[in-house]
Image (spheres, rainbow, N blue to C red):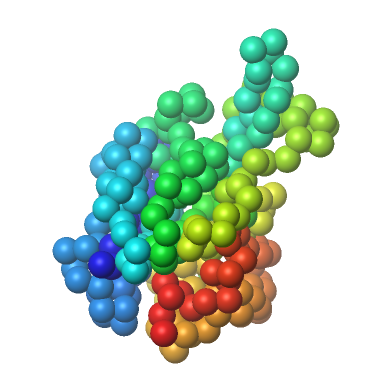
Amino acid sequence: MNAALLVGINAYPTSPLKGCVNDVSDMAQFLAGKMRFDRDSIHLLTDARATTKTIKDRLEQLVGKAKAGDRILFHYSGHGAQYAERDASGDVSSIHDVICPVDFDWSPDRMIKDTDFASLFRSLPLGVEFNWISDSCHSGDLAREIELALNWAYRVPRLFPTPADMQWRIETAKSKDITPLGFGAPTEHLNGALLAGCASNQTSADAVFSSRYNGAFTFVLIKLLDSGSTKSPLNLLIKTAASQLSELHFSQVPQIRGNPAVAERAFLGTE
C-alpha cells in the first residue's frame, strides 16, 4: 500500500503564508504521476481544516493502517516554532521544535511537538518505508523570513512570531545549554527518515519562483525528484538540495534525521 498525508497551511489568522498549499498540491501531483500513488491514497489537509486535532487524527490513521511493505509519506508545509516547557517547580526544563497547526496559540494542546512525532512514528510496524518532509522553520530537529534577493525571489519567513514571555523561556533554556529534544534517537526497526527544510536554529523560506509561491526546500526537492533523483540515496538527495539552495542564495541548510540506514535508500524506498 502507498499512502500520503500532506498538510499545507497558508491561512494563519495572524501570520499568513503564501506557498504552503502550493507545496502540498505539487507533492500530490508528483506522487500521483511520477510515484504512481493511487489518488485515493493521497490525503490533503489545508488551511482551516488543518487543526491540531485533525492533523493528529489523520496521522494516527496513517500510521495505524500501515503494515510491512507499505510506503507512507507525511509532508508538512507551514509555520514552525520552538517551545520551552517549565517543570513542576517552575524551572525551564526542556525545549521543543514544534509545527504550528492553523489553530496554534502557544498552548501545549494547540501544537504538535517533536516528541509527539517521535512517539507516534516509533509505533510503525516493522518493514514500513516511511519518509517525512517538514518545510518549516526549526525543522532540523523536529522550522520562513522577509528579505528581497535577486529579481525572481521574494522570501517570507515560515517562523511563527514568538511572544516575549516564550522568547524569555527559550533564551533561558539556551543559557542552560538545553537543546531541542528532536526526532529522537533512531531505532533499528523504524524505516523512517525526516527530510527537513533547514537546521533547528534556522528558518525556511517562502519564495516566488516564476511568479508563483512555494517553499524553497519543497520546490527544489520536487524539482530534483522529478528530474530523475528518485533513485538517489536520501543523503545524496539532501546534499544536492542544499547545494542548489545555496546557489539560489538561500541560507537554509536541509537536514536528514532518523534511521541512518534509511538515508542510504532512495525516496520512499524507490528501487
In the picture as drawn, the residue positioned furthest to the left comes out as 40
Q: Residue at x 20, y 71 (%)?
A: 38
* In the image: residue 238, left or right of residue 94: left
In the picture as drawn, the residue positioned furthest to the bottom comes out as 228
Using the rendered view, name the quadrant where residue 242 is placed.
bottom right
* In-front residue for pair 24/53: 53
* In-front residue for pair 1/153: 1
Q: Quadrant of the N terminus?
A: bottom left
Asked if one can make out residue 228 in the rendered structure from this viewpoint, the answer is yes
In the picture as drawn, the residue positioned furthest to the top comes out as 89
Q: Residue at x 65, y 18 (%)?
A: 87
Expressed as whole percent of the image width and height from the top left, the position of residue 64 reads 30, 48
Q: Residue at x 66, y 56 (%)?
A: 199
Using the rendered view, name the quadrant where residue 76 is placed.
bottom left
Using the rendered view, name the quadrant where residue 188 is placed.
bottom right
Q: Is residue 117 above or below residue 234?
A: above
Expressed as whole percent of the image width and height from the top left, the position of residue 70 reads 32, 66
* In the image: residue 185, left or right of residue 31: right
Q: Report the number of numbered marks.
A: 0
Q: Is residue 34 above or below residue 104?
A: below
Expressed as whole percent of the image width and height from the top left, the position of residue 134 reads 49, 56
* In the image: residue 164, left or right of residue 223: right
Q: Quadrant of the C terminus?
A: bottom left
